Amino acid sequence: MTGPSSTWPRAASPETRQTIPASPRNYFRTLLILGRASNLPTVWSNCLAGWILGGEGHLSGLFLLILGATSLYVGGMYLNDAFDAEFDRQHRPERPIPSGAISLGEVWGFGVGWLVLGTVLLAFFGPLTFFLTMMLLVSIVAYDIVHKAIAFSPVIMALCRYFLFLVAASTGDEGVTGIAIWTSFALAFYIVGLSYVAKSESTRGALRYWPCWSMAVPLFLAYLINQGVYKRWSVLLSGILLLWTIRSLSFTFWSAEKNIGRTVSGLLAGIALVDLLAVAGGRSPFLTLIFIMLFGAALLFQRLIPAT
């Protein structure tokens, strides 16, 4: 089909490739890939941890929070592919848009729709939550626009999780507490290190160790704020998080064959462990189990849907 007599010489090029009709099952899988659905358990763990540190409240509020946050995350991931369409045509032709699995127009429509839905759902919580949601929305869109063009895009990604955590805290009965703010900062530092490694997957640049040290900030915060029986639990959970982080980083820094994708996937799932360290140490075996299940769900979903 590639010889001079072929009737398809231009249709196969990235610039002119048409959307390929797909079965409903394949189309649904395409939507899940675009939304990086395998990472949703970490969004839910952020919501649960922030909501707890914000004083908890009625479970219906938590459910609405998770719906709104999920919509914003999925919308942001759709727009990520929309803005990256030209880059993906050149460097990642297997992605849904350049492969022809879905049209660019559809991705734009879905992305904007999810963002609007998430904003509306979270606006029901009141002015503070709406303000923080708008800050989150700005961070999401800013990241989608500039993340391939600027070196400090990991900081913008960290802001997305930072504001997500504060949005969650603002929906609790006590609102944005001091511990919620400090925890959101610690989470943001973890995301900076994670995003630095993830960014190198597409830029193929040289990796340095030092940005990854920022992922240790949640460990230091847990050591500083926990006392008594909570101190012992925090040390245990910190050890688990530390071992998991080192294991994930080993696939990139200490492996004969560098596997950045496996490192990033592991660190993404580790977000649930960061949240567990923040709220569940010695508090409740059931609560601890929920975060462990979210961590396991992230790992399981990654086997079905790519995390990046």
Image: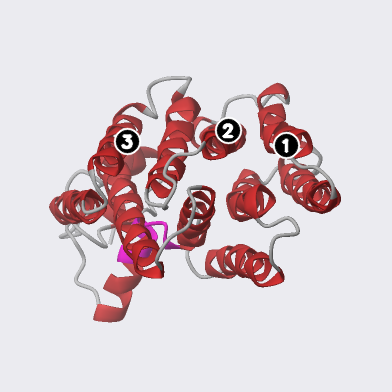
- Left/right placement of residue 211 relative to residue 152 reads right
Asked if residue 174 lies in the magenta stretch, the reply is: no
Q: Are marks 3 and 1 in contact (CB under 8 Å)?
A: no
How far apart marks 3 and 1 lie (CA) works out to 35 Å
Residue 285 image point, x, y percent:
71, 70
The residue positioned 60% from the left and 55% from the top of the image is 272
The residue tagged 3 is 144
Residue type marked 1: Ile
Q: Are marks 1 and 2 in contact (CB under 8 Å)?
A: yes
Residue type marked 2: Trp
How far apart marks 2 and 3 lie (CA) works out to 26 Å
The residue tagged 2 is 182
Q: Which residues are magenta?
A: 31-37
Q: Which is more N-terminal, label 1 or label 3?
A: 3
Query: What is the number of the mark on residue 111?
Result: none
Work out whether 28 lies above or below 76. below
Along the line of sight, the residue nearer the viewer: 33 or 288: 288
